[in-house]
Each structure stands twice: as C-alpha cells, then as structure tokens.
Image (cartoon, helix red, strand yellow):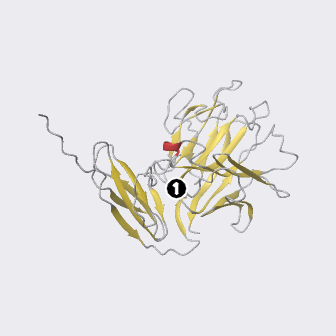
Amino acid sequence: MGTTPTQTQAAAPTIATTAAQNGAVIVSLASATSGATLYYTVDGSTPGTSSPQYLAPFLVAANLNVKAIATASGDTASSVTSQSFTPSIPSGTLVWSDEFSNSTGANAQPNPLVWTYDTGTDCCGNNELETYCAWGSSASSCNPANPNAYVGTDGYLHIVAQQPTAGTAVYTSARLKSEGLFSFQYGRIEARMMLPESQGMWPAFWLLGNNIATISWPACGELDVLEHINGSNPENEGFDWVQGSVHGTNLNGGIQYHPAGFSAAAWHTYGMIWTTGKIQYYVDDPANIYATYTPSTQTGTWPFDSGPQFVIMNLAVGGSWPGSPDATTVFPSTMLVDYVRVYTN
C-alpha cells in the first residue's frame, strides 16, 4: 500500500532592506522555497492569497508594519514574517532619487540597479515606429557605440531618438523602466526635464502598477505624469502644452497644461502628488496643480490604491497619437532628464 507523502511548509519570507535617503528604505522579500509566491500587507493585517502579491522591491518612507507569507504548490503556506518600520520622516522630505551623476569622463550606463529596458520594434503598442534599444545592445538597428540612453558627462540622462540611416523609416530610441527593481506607493514624484519638439516625437514620464505582471493593463493602473507630442496633433491649436493622465479599467482622464508662453523645449519640473484616493499633477511647483483626479470624478475602476507602481521614461517615435515623422523632423532628438526624485507627502 502506498504511503501518503508528508506535506511540507513553504519557507517563511525574509525581509531585507537597503538604505534610500533620509531614513527611508527599499524593502525586498524572498523565500528559500523554489518557485514560491509571496503575498504581503503593510497595514498590520494578516496576509493571505487575496493580499497583494510581492513583485518588486518597494520604498518604505512611512511608519508601517510589513507582514508576508509564502505559498508554493504542494506545500502549506508559510508562517507569517513581520517587521515594523518607524522612520517618522517629516512631510516634504526627499526619500529617493536618481540624480544622474557621472564623473567617469565618458558617457555612462544608467544605473542598472534602478533601470532596465523595454526593447524591440513596436514592443508596447500604440503603433509606434521606433526600435527600443537597451544599453549595450547590438540587436538589429541598435548601436552600442551610439547608445539611445546614457548619462552624459553633463550630469543629465539623455534619451535619444535616432534615424540610423537618413531617408529611411527605421528609427531607434529607448524606454527605461524600474520594473522589478524599484517601486513606490504614495508620495510626491517629480522629474526635471527638457523635451524635444519635432513632428512624431512622443516623450513620456509615467508609472505602471507592479501587478501588470499578474492582471495586465489597464487593470494595473497607469499614471502619466507627463506626455507631450508635437506636430500633426489636432489639439495643438497654436500653443504648446503637456498632459497629465490616469488610466484604469474603463477609466480614462487627461488634462492639458498650457499657460501663456509655456514651452516644453525649456527646462521644467513635472510632478505628481499621490495620496489615498487622489492623484494630482503639477508643473514647476507642487503648489501649481493643474489636474486632480479622484474616484468620484472618474468613471471606471480606480486602481491606484492597490499597490506600488514602477517608473518609466521613454521617447517614442510615431504612433497613433503623434503621427509619423516627416521632412521637418529633427534627428537625433533628445529628451534630457536632470533628476527623478520622490518625496514624502
């Protein structure tokens, strides 16, 4: 007669931290059980399989209690691991940033501990025309000697749209993201940027939910701190503008910022204030809020209180919104980023 195998228990998660800034930490969860799925809470409640799934390291800059369990096929759920964090950080404190510093004397790779890449031709929808290239990539159309994303000796991140061979419809660019490496929920994020203004250019600074890996888009939520297009846009009626948007399941909202004399080709700071049940966008000053979104002002499902999001910066070429490049389009076109910073609310 066969023997019923003894069921084992998944190994309890471990909680590791690395320092961010001014008392904040980045929290990582892991389990020694191969293939385990981790679930966690930050409000002191006991986690279960209906709790948020751990998918990436996340910033902790507020007083909270992280609890986590691990599950694995054939095993019983692990015991609960718990750790309290009491950083007691004042409001408005800088808690994480990438300043894009570079003292090497040559163009440098964006920090690989923070940034990875989406790659390929029309990798991500929108009928875009560019091939996105990672740092060091020699894939078709990509040239590691002429990168599409690098930190220059000027201390700026350069995201460059190129036309490797003039007169062709082949374009390259870069789409950097912190997916799987860094994420956060709630706080104020901003980037100081100078944008290209040329037909077919589509620079963006935005966020997606970590849970895009499990529930897909748009259910994961999308927060567009900045989008800008120029050229054949019917909304561009003699003035320059940028737009801040929110997207979720049956949820779409977008508001333009276009004060007199505004130029996206000049340096501006583009930011978002994220609190429970509210998203606000501003330009240059957190007091200069031009768009506010809440569940009561938007139809559809509000996804922005469901967990952390990761950061994306990209320069698309062409696509459904801006249209294609034409004879007036400037190549190379560059999106410059001075810094990306996260503050406490």
Q: Which of 212/300 is in front?
A: 300
Q: Position of residue 218 (x, y in %)?
A: 61, 44
Q: Amino acid at mark 1?
A: Pro
Give the residue drawn at x 75%, y 38%.
322
Tag 1, which secondary structure?
A: loop
* Residue 196 falls in image quadrant: top right
Vertical relation: 47 (above or below) 125 = below
Residue drawn at the location 53% of the way across and 44% of the way down: 212
Which residue is more in the foreground, 251 or 33?
251
Q: In the rendering, at what x and y percent does residue 94 appear?
A: 55, 67
Q: Name the side, left or right, on which 34 lies relative to 209.
A: left
Q: Is residue 33 left or right of residue 294?
A: left
Identify the image quadrant of the C terminus. bottom right
Tell me the residue at 74%/65% (across/down).
Answer: 288
Residue under label 1: 308
Q: Residue furthest right?
A: 238
